[in-house]
């Protein structure tokens, strides 16, 4: 990464953390200078000189910049560690406020009978894993999971599955390869593990062929199916998934029997 790219990345991240563009540019400029006047900040940051004063005034009120009241005034950024701690507290406070506001937001009454079945879609490995962890955490009786792409086996996933096992939920884990089933068996030795023989899950494994990455069925009514292009460079980032809840019982029974093909012993719960 070049110096200009590094500077721009720092500016972008500061904006993500709540600073306006001119504030971010001025703060980064002051980190390049031991100290500086408004003109010197303008020269480095390319922020219009008339806007520098407002930007550094805001930065001062946020505890990120110190001012020497000379003529002309001189500004300097606080120590990097102090600045990051200040921004971290500010960001945490915003998240806490967001949580409070969301919890206090008025919830509209809905007719459950009109919302029995719902289907939602999501994109990206992080979002999909987050939904999987939420499903596991909310499970009441059974979790059936088939994994086709080994890269989705995260430590966080195993921690959640371990919690489910300790809570005495029924957990069925399937893998498309020996490596996946072996990992399941090692990490969760008391869980029933099977190797699925459904070849259609992986497709032709070329860049234009879509494949299933994961299938999860929770409490026989909540289903998540992920898909991706295995040969694509950005396969993990562009993984897509469909999440459905409140499924009809007949569909659930069919899906459960389909994804658990390979169980070594007949499951009496079927």
Image: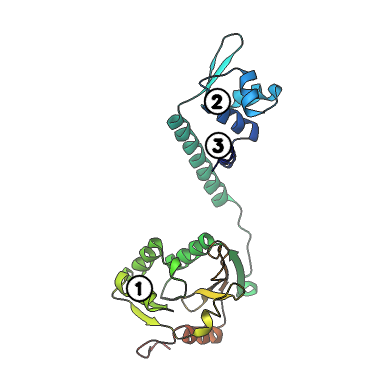
From the viewer's perspective, is residue 33 above or below residue 13? above
Where residue 110 is drawn, which disc sits there? none
Q: Residue at x 52, y 48 (%)?
A: 99
Q: Determine the image quadrant of residue 266.
A: bottom left
**Can residue 170 be spotted in the picture?**
no
Q: Secondary structure at mark 1?
A: helix
Residue with the most extreme top position: 71
Q: CA distance from mark 3 to mark 1?
A: 44 Å
Residue at numbered disc 2:
30
Q: Secondary structure at mark 2?
A: helix
Q: CA distance from mark 3 to mark 2?
A: 16 Å
Residue at numbered disc 1:
184
Residue at numbered disc 3:
3
- Comparing 250 with 23, the one in front is 23
Q: Quadrant of the C terminus?
A: bottom left
- The nearer-to-camera label among 3 and 1 is 3
- The nearer-to-camera label among 1 and 2 is 2
Q: CA distance from mark 1 to mark 2?
A: 51 Å
Measured as percent of width and height from the top left, residue 145 is found at: 44, 75
């Amino acid at each position: 990464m070049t110096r200009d790219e590094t500077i721009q990345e720092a500016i972008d991240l500061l904006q993500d953390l709540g600073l306006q563009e001119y504030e971010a540019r001025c703060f980064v400029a002051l980190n390049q200078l031991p100290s500086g006047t408004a003109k010197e900040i303008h020269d480095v940051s390319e922020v219009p000189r008339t806007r520098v004063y407002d930007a550094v005034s805001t930065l001062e009120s946020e505890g990120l910049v110190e001012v020497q009241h000379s003529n002309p005034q001189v500004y300097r950024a606080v120590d990097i560690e102090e600045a990051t701690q200040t921004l971290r507290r500010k960001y945490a406070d915003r998240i806490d406020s967001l949580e409070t506001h969301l919890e206090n937001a008025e919830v509209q009454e809905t007719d459950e009978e009109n919302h029995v079945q719902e289907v939602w879609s999501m994109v990206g490995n992080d979002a999909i894993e987050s939904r999987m962890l939420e499903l596991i955490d909310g499970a009441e009786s059974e979790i059936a999971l088939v994994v086709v792409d080994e890269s989705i086996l995260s430590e966080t996933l195993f921690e959640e599955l371990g919690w489910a096992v300790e809570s005495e939920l029924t957990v069925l884990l399937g893998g498309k390869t020996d490596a996946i089933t072996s990992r399941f068996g090692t990490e969760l030795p008391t869980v029933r593990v099977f190797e699925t023989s459904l070849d259609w899950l992986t497709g032709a494994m070329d860049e234009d062929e879509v494949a299933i990455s994961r299938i999860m069925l929770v409490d026989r009514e909540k289903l998540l199916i992920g898909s991706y292009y295995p040969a694509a460079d950005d396969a993990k980032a562009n993984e897509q998934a469909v999440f459905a809840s409140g499924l009809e019982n007949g569909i659930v029974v069919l899906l459960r029997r389909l994804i658990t093909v390979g169980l070594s012993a007949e499951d009496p719960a079927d």
